[in-house]
């Protein structure tokens, strides 16, 4: 995990080994406006602004982290799964108890930062590409050089080695973790998840991790190791999310 090529930002270092010990289901695409608008109809929540880029199968955007986890809980309830998040953002295990043990979270949730990078790299099938599925960003990513700085329908570029689309570019994807340089430097080797806000640096206090880059930024942000962060209450422009869930044994 991290900058293994020596051309990344300081926040992507040090490169370190991570062992994910459980199976994981990951959304083939980021959540789309079509899916999120259906949720808004069911809950009578306001639909997020597409800023004239279009809705339908384009990835939903302009969502705060808190809105993303509310969608995850709604989806869990709809499919008869336990909620993954307490209202304060803490994770819940299959019995509804607060936990930092990601292996015990049964409901739909956001990927941890380590899970996201593992999936973006293609998991055990990964070939060491700079972007998710290729060294050529134009084949797998929407970024400012090929998108006219507008999001595009999901699944229009090639998938990565795991069959996942749009992990590079299109929209930034919220992750479950709090952002921290210190935590990343000292990350546990097994099943890492930074669920403690105290780990955050003063300069970036109370920010959640985002991964993947976006349609309005250059291709360097779409690399599989690129890291960014935002306050969880901020509905970031060109920021969306992808869902996942742990395969509970």
Image: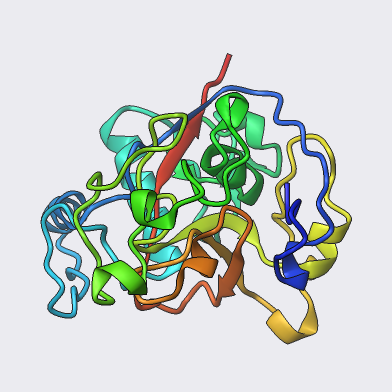
Q: Is residue 205 above or below residue 120?
A: below
Q: Position of residue 109 (x, y in %)?
A: 47, 44
In the image, taking residue 231 as reference, residue 148 lies left or right, namely: left
User: What residue is rendered at 29% in x and 68% in y?
Assistant: 146
Q: Is 105 above or below relative to 56?
A: above
Nearest to the observer: residue 149 or residue 85: 149
Instruction: Name the residue located 18 percent from the left edge and 73 percent from the top edge.
Output: 50
User: Residue 39: x percent and y percent?
Assistant: 19, 52
Q: Residue at x 52, y 68 (%)?
A: 221
Q: In the image, is 220 to the left or to the right of 38?
A: right
Residue 123: quadrant of the picture: top right
| Residue toward you, 113 or 214 | 214
Image coords of residue 17 (percent x, y): 82, 40
Assign the C terminus to one quadrant of the image: top right
- Against 79, residue 198 (above or below) is below
| Colouring scheme, one of rainbow, by chain, secondary structure, one colour | rainbow
Q: Is residue 153 left or right of residue 28?
A: left
Task: Give the camera-side residue of 129 and 221.
Answer: 129
x%, y% of residue 164? 39, 37
Among all residues in the image, which is located at the extreme top?
Answer: 249
Question: As drawn, which residue projects farthest toward the right?
Answer: 186
Residue 118 to residue 193: above or below: above
- Please indicate whether residue 247 sits to the left or right of residue 62 in the image: right
Quarter-wise, where is residue 151 in the image? bottom left
Count numbered badges in the picture: 0
- Residue situated furthest bottom in the rendering: 203
- Please name the residue shown 45% across and 52% down the image: 136
The residue nearer to you, when weighing 129 against 197, is 129
């Amino acid at each position: 995990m991290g900058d293994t090529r020596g051309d990344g930002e300081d926040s992507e270092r040090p490169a370190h080994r991570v062992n994910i010990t459980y199976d994981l289901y990951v959304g083939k695409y980021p959540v789309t406006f079509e899916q999120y608008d259906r949720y808004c109809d069911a809950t009578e929540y306001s639909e997020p602004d597409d800023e004239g880029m279009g809705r339908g199968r384009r990835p939903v955007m302009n969502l705060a982290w808190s809105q993303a986890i509310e969608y995850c809980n709604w989806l869990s309830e709809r499919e008869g799964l336990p909620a993954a998040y307490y209202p304060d953002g803490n994770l819940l295990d299959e019995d509804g108890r607060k936990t930092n043990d990601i292996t015990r979270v049964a409901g739909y949730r956001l990927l941890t930062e380590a899970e996201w990078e593992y999936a973006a790299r293609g998991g055990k099938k990964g070939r060491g590409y700079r972007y998710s599925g290729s060294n050529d960003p134009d084949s797998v990513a929407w970024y400012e050089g090929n998108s006219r700085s507008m999001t595009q329908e999901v699944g229009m570029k090639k998938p990565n080695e795991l069959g996942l689309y749009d992990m590079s570019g299109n929209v930034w994807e919220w992750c479950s973790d709090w952002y921290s340089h210190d935590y990343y430097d000292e990350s546990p080797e097994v099943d890492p998840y930074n669920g403690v806000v105290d780990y955050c640096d003063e300069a970036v206090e109370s920010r959640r991790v985002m991964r993947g880059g976006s349609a309005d930024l250059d291709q360097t942000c779409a690399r599989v190791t690129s890291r960014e962060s935002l306050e969880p209450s901020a509905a970031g422009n060109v920021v969306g999310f992808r869902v996942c869930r742990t395969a509970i044994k």
